[in-house]
Image (cartoon, rainbow, N blue to C red):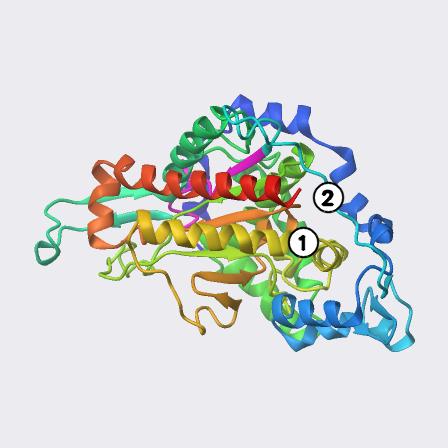
Amino acid sequence: MNIFFLVYYMNRLFSISILVFIYFFVFSPNSLTSLDLINNFQDFEVYQKTFSKEEVYEKIEQMLKKDPEIELWYNIQADRLNVYACPEDKVKDIPEFTLYFGHKEKFKKTFPSLENSHMPLKGLRIAIDPGHIGGNYAKIEEKYVEMSPNREKNIYEPLAFHEGELSVITAKKLAKKLEALGAKVFLTKSNPGEVVYKKKFEEWFQNDISEAIDLMTSYQEDPELKKDEIFWWTNQATSSEIFRLTYNYLDVERRAELINAFKPHVTVSCHYNLGCPYDKDGKSPGTSADYTFFFVPGAFKKGDTKNEAFSKKSLKNARSRYEFIRFIVTDDIEQSIDLAKTAVSYSKQILKSPILNNVNFAKDQCLYNSAGIYHRNLCLNCLVHGPLLYGEPLLQDNYSNAKILASNPDVLIDKVVNIYYRSILDWAESLTQSD
């Protein structure tokens, strides 16, 4: 890694707006810190003896278990599910939390009455998270689309745009439409280039990177491999790799804390997809392919020791085990699937681009649910409480889409907003009917 380039680049990064500091100091909820969540397994006592062994087993197998290795942190007995702090505790049978099976009436979440035909979303709290950061961070987070002219593809001039800006525009448009129908909406950020974490990346890198490397490499038990990882982080990792594997997760985790403090009935995470990685010149080669899909929570993995302390993909840390139990006892995943199915239907009508239906898509990361819907244990997916609509509509680097997104993005953005908007309306109506 060229440290001089990194310092130079970081010095040019966009400063955090005062709004983010207001978020941090005003909305920071002590009750939602990771430490408190870790110690609050008693949150699940209300669910004791309400699930059968078969229900728990089926949910874990179909939605939560991506890798068999996570079984080192739990076991299912005839009358209970035990979750353990570490594999050694499983051997000793010292559970961190026990969920007893039974057939008591299930605990039900309450929703506001949505019976006002003029304001059908009145009383509903909706959080919207514009995916990624963008602005001066767009290139370092590898969400910047830059395409050279390609006469064969009818691209006659250079194109450039970034997902962070597209997602903010999408979020603001969606918020306006939802608020017009009575919803109370919370945006995690309002402008491209804003970070939500308490420190800018350059400040964090200068003051905290050594501690971060110590933490990440502590997960590696093999002394030689640990030495190799330390060398990689300190001598070989690029600025982009450091940003994406560490700091980016801190920003996402902070977004999740703000969302959970808002206590939304539903959350929307706005993204746009990419089909191809950068070429050797750091540009987007472009693609003729195009498709849309949605992520839902689940698919816990064995974890990559390189950045497991930040990514939280496995059950090695207590926060992930807390969320693992939450997914078992709540219907957050099921509600997310319902939302995604509705959004898939509207995507077919509105975007008219193919729905990705590949059972082996991202097979090292995802569990296939159904056409266009994939379980994946992304940081936001895991940490946000309640139903989540996480969209990956269209390919930004599709030749036709890229021309529109670079010159007149509202043409496509308005279609995506309409997908989210109509999906939430249908979901809210279903809540009223179920009551």
Left or right placement of residue 148 versus residue 365 in this view? left
Q: Which residues are magenta?
A: 126-142
Left or right placement of residue 392 versus residue 230 in this view? left
User: In the picture, residue 200 is in which quadrant?
Assistant: top right
Q: Would you say residue 155 is visible in this rendering?
A: yes
Of labels 2 and 1, earlier in sequence is 2
x, y percentage for residue 221?
A: 72, 72
Q: Amino acid at mark 2?
A: Lys
**Which residue is at 48% across, 33% downward?**
194
Q: Secondary structure under badge 1?
A: loop
Whether the magenta-drawn stretch holds residue 331 is answered as no
Q: Are marks 2 and 1 in contact (CB under 8 Å)?
A: yes
Residue 331 numbered tag: 1
Say which of 79 and 385 sits in front.
79
x, y percentage for residue 168?
A: 42, 35
Residue 116 numbered tag: none
Quadrant containing the N terminus is bottom left
Q: Amino acid at mark 1?
A: Asp
Label 2, on which residue? 109
Give the Cα distance between marks 2 and 1: 9 Å
